[in-house]
Image (cartoon, grey):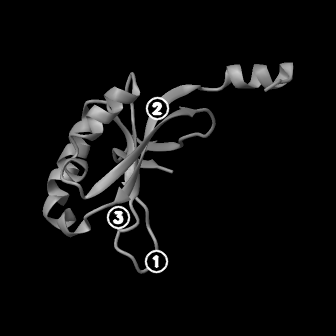
Amino acid sequence: MDLTPIAQDMLRAMLNKPLFVALRNPADLTKSAALLEAHLEWAVAAERRGELFASGPFIAEGAPPGSLGGMTIVRAASLAEARKILEQDPFVREGVVSIDLRKWSLMEGGITLSMRFSDQTARLM
């Protein structure tokens, strides 16, 4: 693809942060309630280790969370490392969901955080 010099400059200035996105596809949801606690423990531990960037279920009105699958974004050095991280998730390991894993480049967007020191609260917007 031939890019204009301005487009090339714009792309160079962007974050260009490589991450890995797992689209979580429902497989055997009959086990999800029994494994939910273990799945959440895995997610919190992965978050604390810095591996988990963001994760959550897809939502539709009238459908239970996760019945449509979900998405998990992990930090890893390679596709193989990302897969190894995700295979530790009880939902993946026990076949509640299957994953379609892809490398992704975070380019645009933003996060707004409001912090109040007086009452020690924070809010992500």
Q: CA distance from mark 1 to mark 2?
A: 30 Å
The image position of residue 6, as x and y in percent, is 84, 22
Question: Does any portion of residue 47 appear in the rendered image?
Answer: no
Name the amino acid type tagged 3.
Gly
Question: Does any portion of residue 11 appear in the rendered image?
Answer: yes
Q: Which mark sits nearer the N-terminus, 1 or 3?
A: 1
Mark 2 neighbour class, 10 Å CA radius: few under 14, some 14 to 19, many 20 or more: many
Quarter of the rendering containing residue 33: bottom left
- Residue at image mark 1: 61
Q: Which mark sits nearer the N-terminus, 1 or 2?
A: 2
Quadrant containing the N terminus is: top right
Q: Residue at x 25, y 40 (%)?
A: 87
The image position of residue 122, as x and y in percent, is 40, 46
Q: Secondary structure at mark 2?
A: strand
| Mark whose residue sits in front, 1 or 3 | 3
Q: CA distance from mark 2 to mark 3?
A: 22 Å
Name the amino acid type tagged 1.
Glu
Mark 1 neighbour class, 10 Å CA radius: few under 14, some 14 to 19, many 20 or more: few
- Residue at image mark 3: 66
Mark 3 neighbour class, 10 Å CA radius: few under 14, some 14 to 19, many 20 or more: some
Q: CA distance from mark 1 to mark 3?
A: 12 Å
Measured along the vertical axis of the image, is residue 46 above or below residue 40?
A: above
Check contact, mark 1 vs mark 3: CB within 8 A: no
Q: Which mark sits nearer the N-terminus, 2 or 3?
A: 2
- Residue at image mark 2: 19
Q: Secondary structure at mark 1?
A: loop
